Amino acid sequence: MTLVAGVDSSTQSCKVLIVDAGTGHIVRVGKAAHPDGSEIAPAHWWSALQDAIHDAGGLADVAAVSVAGQQHGMVLLDTEGRVLRDALLWNDTRSAGAAADLITEIGAAELAQRCGSVPVASLTITKVRWVRDHEPAIAARVAAVALPHDWLSWRLRGYGPADQSPLGSDLEQLTTDRSDASGTGYWSPHTGSYDLDLFRAAFGRTARVAGSAEHAGTHIVLPKVAAPSDITGTVHSDLFVGAAAVTVKVGAGAGDNAAGALGLGAASGDVVISVGTSGTVFAVSAHPSADATGTIAGFADASGAYLPIAVTLNAARILSTTAGLLGIDFEEFATLALAAQPGSAGVVLVPYFEGERTPNLPDATASFHGLSITSTTRENIARASIEGMLCGLAGGLDAIKASGTAVERVLLIGGAVQNTAVQIVAGQVFDALVVVPTPGEYVARGAAAQAAWLLTGTRPDWALETIAAPPADYRPEILGQYRAVAGAA
Ligand SMILES: Nc1ncnc2c1ncn2[C@@H]1O[C@H](COP(=O)(O)OP(=O)(O)O)[C@@H](O)[C@H]1O
Ligand SMILES: O=C(CO)[C@@H](O)[C@H](O)COP(=O)(O)O
C-alpha cells in the first residue's frame, strides 16, 4: 500500500490525513490548533503543521504530501526570508477602504474581467494596498509576497528564514497553485498568469515571478504557479526527527475550497457548501467567471478548471458564540434548536458578528430581530442562530444558480455540519437536494488526492461516502423572514 498525506492548514487548526493512495482510505490522522485572531504570526502555522504531522505518526512511510490552506492571507518576506509582519488573514477587514479605493481607481467591471473578482477586504490585493498606505517602512522592505499554503510548502521543502532553515531563504523556490493564486486578486484565471500591472497599481512596487532571472534583486517575488499535478520538490530531511529520512514528494497544494472540491470529487451539478470558520458556496465550472457585482468571486480550481464561489465571514462561529451565550455544548444546542419550530417563532438572527463579506458589509454587526416576551426562548435563539447562518449561505446558493451553474445537489461539509440540527435545518433553508458526506476533513482529503495524483499521473477517483440525507423539507418562510430584516441590516 502506498501512503500519501494531505494537509489542511485552516483558520482554526491544522489537520493531517494519511491515506491509502489507491483507495483514499484513512490510515492515520493528526491535528493541532491555531491561535485565534485575524492577524497571525505564520510561525504558529509552521509549529502546528509539525505538531499535526507528529500527531499523525510522521511522514517516514509516506510517498507524497500536499498542503491546502486558508486562502488570501498575506505573508510578507524580506530578502532573508524573514516574515516582516504578522499575516493579515482572509477575515481581517481593515483593508475594506483599500478595496473601495482600488474599485474607484480601476473599476469593478475591469477588476472582475482582469482577475475574476471584485476585491473585498479578504483578497490579498487589498492587504498589500493597506500595507503600502499604513506601513510604508515595511512595504519598502518586502522582497516576496506569499500565501499560507505557499509559505508552508516552502518551509516543508527546507526553505525559510536564512538562519533557521537548512536550505536557506531562496525566494526563487516559492511556489503556489492556480486556485490560491486566483484568490490574490492579481492573478488571472482567464490568462493563467499574474497581472503584474495590477500588483504594481495596488502596491506601488514592481513584481516578477519566482525563478525568472529578469529584474532579480529589484522586483518583488511572487510564487511560481505550479500545475495541479506538478511535483515542486521534496520534504527536507530535517522533518524526519527520530526516523531515517526518505524521499517524500511535495505537491502544488491548493486553496482550501479548491482542495475541498478535489476531496469530494465534485462534478457538474454539485454545489459544495462548507460551514467552517468561513461559509462558502462553490462549484467546479469549465469556464472562468467575472461577476462585476462582486457576489461571486471567479477563482480557479485545483484540477485545471474554475471555481465560482460566494463566501461569508460568519459561519461556524455563530453557533459557538450562541452556544457559549446559552452555556451549553453543541449536542445540547442541537437538541434545543430542534425543539423549536421552523422559523423560530419569528426570531431572526442576522449574524454579522465579524462584519460581512457577502453581502459586502465589513463594518456590520449582528442583531436579533422579532424578540417578544413569548418568542425569547433558549430554543428559538438556538434555532435562529442556525437559520441565520444558513440563510446567509442561501444568498450565495442563489447567486451561483443565477450565474447559470447547474445545481443537482448540495454537498454539505465543514466542522459545523457535524451538528445534526445544522443538517436538518439545511434541508429547510436550501431549495435543493442536500447530501451530507460522512463528516470528515475533505480539504485535507483533497490535498491527499493531489499527492496521489502527482505520484501516478492520474487523478484519483476515490469513493465518496454519505450519511442519510436530511428530509427534503423546504420552508421558504425561513428565508423570507430573514430577508425581510437582513435587507435592512
Ligand atoms: N457539533 C458541532 N456543532 C457546531 N459547530 C461545530 C461542531 N463541531 C465543530 N464545530 C465548529 O466547527 C468549526 C471548525 O470547523 P472547520 O471546518 O474545521 O473550520 P476551519 O476549516 O475554518 O478551521 C469550529 O468553529 C467549531 O466550533
Ligand atoms: O476566504 C476564504 C475563501 O475565499 C475562506 O474560505 C478561507 O479560505 C478560510 O477558510 P476556512 O478556514 O474557514 O476553511
Image (spheres, helix red, strand yellow):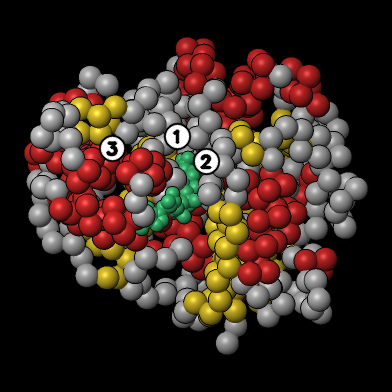
Query: Distance of mark 1 from mark 3, alpha carbons?
Result: 22 Å
- The picture places residue 37, in percent across and down from the top left corner, at 57, 37
* In the displayed structure image, the side of residue 307 where residue 39 appears, left or right: right
Of residue 461 and residue 359, the one placed in the foreground of this image is 359
Q: Residue 487 is drawn in which quadrant?
A: top left
**Residue tagged by mark 2?**
182
**Amino acid at the residue labelled 2:** Ser
Q: Dot 2 lies on which element?
A: loop
Residue at 50% across, 35% down:
91
Residue at 58% across, 68% down:
30
* In the displayed structure image, the side of residue 58 where residue 108 appears, left or right: left
Q: Is residue 28 above or below residue 9?
A: below
Query: Distance of mark 1 from mark 2, alpha carbons?
Result: 8 Å
**Residue tagged by mark 1?**
116
Q: Answer few, some or many: residues within 10 Å of disc 1's Cα (few below 14, many 20 plus, some between 14 and 19).
A: many
Q: Earlier in the sequence, mark 1 or mark 3?
A: 1
Q: Are marks 1 and 2 in contact (CB under 8 Å)?
A: yes
Residue at 10% across, 34% down:
374
Q: Dot 3 lies on which element?
A: helix
Q: Is residue 193 visible?
A: no
**Residue tagged by mark 3?**
392
Q: Is residue 122 visible?
A: yes
Query: Distance of mark 2 from mark 3, alpha carbons?
Result: 24 Å
Q: Answer few, some or many: residues within 10 Å of disc 3's Cα (few below 14, many 20 plus, some between 14 and 19).
A: many
Q: Residue 31 is drawn in which quadrant?
A: bottom right
Q: Are marks 2 and 3 in contact (CB under 8 Å)?
A: no
**Amino acid at the residue labelled 1:** Gly
Q: Earlier in the sequence, mark 1 or mark 2?
A: 1
- The picture places residue 384, in percent across and down from the top left corner, at 22, 40
